[in-house]
Image: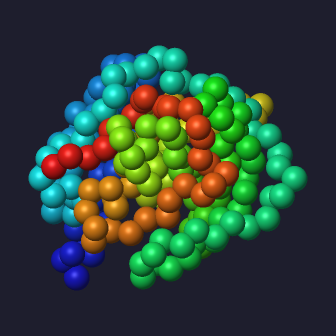
């Protein structure tokens, strides 16, 4: 039971990490990086076993305003985690054009739901985690920095907040990774780099 309570506390702290502190520009990003490193270094439920997250330099050009576009095939997509969570079903919410390539915004169909935006780009495998990174996974409390919804259908994507899934740090974690429709050929040199303990 204490382990589950620790996990609940970790998730609450992740929500605070995205909700609290300065939100805009490089100052907001630096504050987020600092508080995230502290959380990962001190919390018993941290996926990081030694070492600290490393990041590309902040890039104001990685803040991308876009609009959600409808998709012809809005059917379900299933991503297997390879673990006890099994396959997770997602609805295709819409396509987000970006300078790096189009990305599909997903909605988890399981209990509670949530927006999910995994990305695999040309830095993956060398500079960043080979399986890709996440821009948001609102089921885990990461809403509000990497992806911001605006009135009138505008979406602001801030790729400086790309982060590694837990499986990038430790093999005890299994994660849904970017499906083919969220793999882009361009490098996104923003956000978290490959973890090196």
Question: Residue 23, relative to residue 110: is it above or below?
Answer: above
- The colour scheme used to paint the residues is rainbow
- Total number of numbered discs in the rendering: 0
Res 88 quadrant in image:
bottom right
Residue at image position (64%, 59%) is 107
Is residue 3 toward the left or the right of residue 104 in the image? left
Toward the right, the furthest residue is 72
Residue at image position (43%, 29%) is 189
* Camera-nearest residue between 72 and 123: 123
Residue at image position (60%, 41%) is 184
Res 173 quadrant in image:
bottom left
x, y percent for residue 60: 47, 17
Residue at image position (48%, 71%) is 81
x, y percent for residue 55: 30, 33
For residue 138, say whether it is visible: no
* Camera-nearest residue between 96 and 178: 178
x, y percent for residue 23: 42, 28
* Camera-nearest residue between 88 and 155: 88
For residue 181, say whether it is visible: yes
Is residue 84 toward the left or the right of residue 52 in the image? right
Is residue 153 toward the left or the right of residue 26 in the image? right
x, y percent for residue 72: 87, 53
- State which quarter of the image contains the N terminus: bottom left
């Amino acid at each position: 039971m204490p382990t589950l309570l620790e996990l609940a506390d970790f998730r609450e702290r992740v929500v605070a990490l995205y909700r609290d502190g300065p939100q805009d520009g490089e100052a907001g990003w630096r504050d987020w990086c600092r508080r995230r490193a502290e959380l990962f270094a001190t919390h018993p439920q941290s996926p990081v076993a030694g070492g600290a997250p490393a990041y590309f330099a902040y890039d104001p050009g990685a803040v991308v305003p876009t609009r959600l576009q409808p998709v012809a095939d809005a059917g379900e997509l299933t991503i297997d985690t390879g673990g006890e969570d099994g396959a997770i079903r997602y609805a295709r919410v819409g396509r987000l054009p970006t300078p790096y390539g189009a990305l599909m915004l997903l909605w988890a169909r399981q209990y509670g739901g949530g927006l999910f935006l995994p990305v695999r780009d040309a830095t993956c495998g060398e500079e960043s985690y080979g399986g890709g990174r996440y821009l948001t996974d609102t089921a885990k409390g990461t809403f509000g920095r990497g992806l911001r919804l605006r009135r009138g259908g505008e979406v602001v994507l801030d790729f400086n907040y790309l982060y590694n899934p837990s499986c990038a740090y430790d093999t005890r974690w299994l994660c849904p990774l970017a499906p083919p429709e969220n793999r882009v050929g361009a490098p996104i040199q923003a956000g978290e780099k490959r973890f090196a303990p």
